[in-house]
């Protein structure tokens, strides 16, 4: 046991658990996006326009960038639990983890705040300035649509927490500068 009262291997085990939790989050996140891209509607509510269409070149470029981010979001946490992940410099892993954490947490938090502002009447058009009709195609969306949005936004926040926790644990880990894998 160390002076802090934890076993010597507890740090790497915590790093591994955090990375695996982020990995599972990313797999589910990506699978749901694939399902929605293929036309699935579960989890999106029943409003007519909850899935935006990629109609311009800019939309397609944005989609390609996001797809790349999905790939990194899945592979990086998995790499942190595998020997082949040692090839990733710690600074690069931490940069990606903190960036991903910030992006998904801010996206989810902003969505939750937007819905809360509309729901409480503090801002009729929420944080974005858009009406429900502009967002969903329905001026008076069902509770299912609103709560589906809250669920998706909360899942984003969860991802931000998991990636941030993984980054914290990796940053505090006492491992060689070249390796990021917990044994």
Image: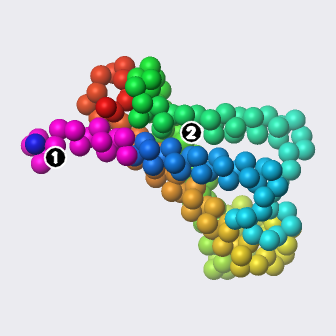
> Which residue position holds label 1?
6
Tell me the quarter of the image containing the C terminus. top left
Bounds of the magenta segment:
2-17
Position of 26 compared to 141: left or right?
left
Q: Is residue 48 above or below residue 174?
A: below
Residue 173: x %, y % from top left: 29, 35
Front residue (pair 44, 114):
44
Mark 2 Cα-neighbour bin, 10 Å: few <14, some 14–19, many ≥20: many
Between the C-alphas of marks 2 and 1, the distance is 30 Å
Tell me the quarter of the image containing the N terminus. top left
Residue 132: x %, y % from top left: 79, 70
Image point (63%, 68%), residue name? 150
Is residue 10 found inside the magenta-colored segment of the image?
yes
Q: Tell me which label, 2 or 1, sits earlier in the chain.
A: 1
Image point (48%, 38%), residue name? 77
- Helix, strand or loop at label 2? It is helix
Q: Is residue 62 above or below residue 143?
A: above
Residue 93: x %, y % from top left: 46, 30
Image point (85%, 63%), residue name? 49
> Which residue position holds label 2?
73
Position of 129 compared to 157: left or right?
right
- Helix, strand or loop at label 1? It is loop
Position of 142 compared to 71: left or right?
right
Front residue (pair 5, 140):
5
Front residue (pair 14, 120):
14
Is residue 57 found inside the magenta-colored segment of the image?
no
């Amino acid at each position: 046991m160390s002076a802090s009262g934890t076993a010597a291997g507890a740090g790497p085990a915590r790093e591994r658990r955090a990375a695996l939790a982020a990995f599972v989050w990313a797999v589910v996140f990506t699978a749901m996006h694939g399902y929605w891209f293929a036309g699935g509607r579960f989890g999106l509510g029943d409003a007519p326009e909850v899935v935006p269409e990629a109609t311009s070149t800019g939309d397609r470029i944005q989609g390609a960038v996001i797809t790349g981010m999905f790939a990194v979001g899945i592979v990086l946490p998995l790499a942190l639990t595998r020997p082949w992940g040692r090839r990733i410099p710690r600074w690069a892993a931490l940069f990606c983890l903190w960036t991903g954490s910030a992006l998904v947490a801010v996206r989810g938090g902003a969505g939750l705040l937007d819905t809360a502002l509309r729901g409480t009447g503090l801002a009729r058009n929420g944080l974005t300035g858009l009406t429900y009709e502009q967002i969903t195609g329905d001026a008076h969306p069902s509770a299912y649509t609103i709560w589906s949005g809250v669920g998706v936004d909360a899942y984003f926040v969860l991802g931000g927490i998991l990636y941030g926790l993984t980054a914290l644990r990796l940053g505090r880990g006492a491992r060689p500068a070249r390796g990021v894998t917990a044994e």
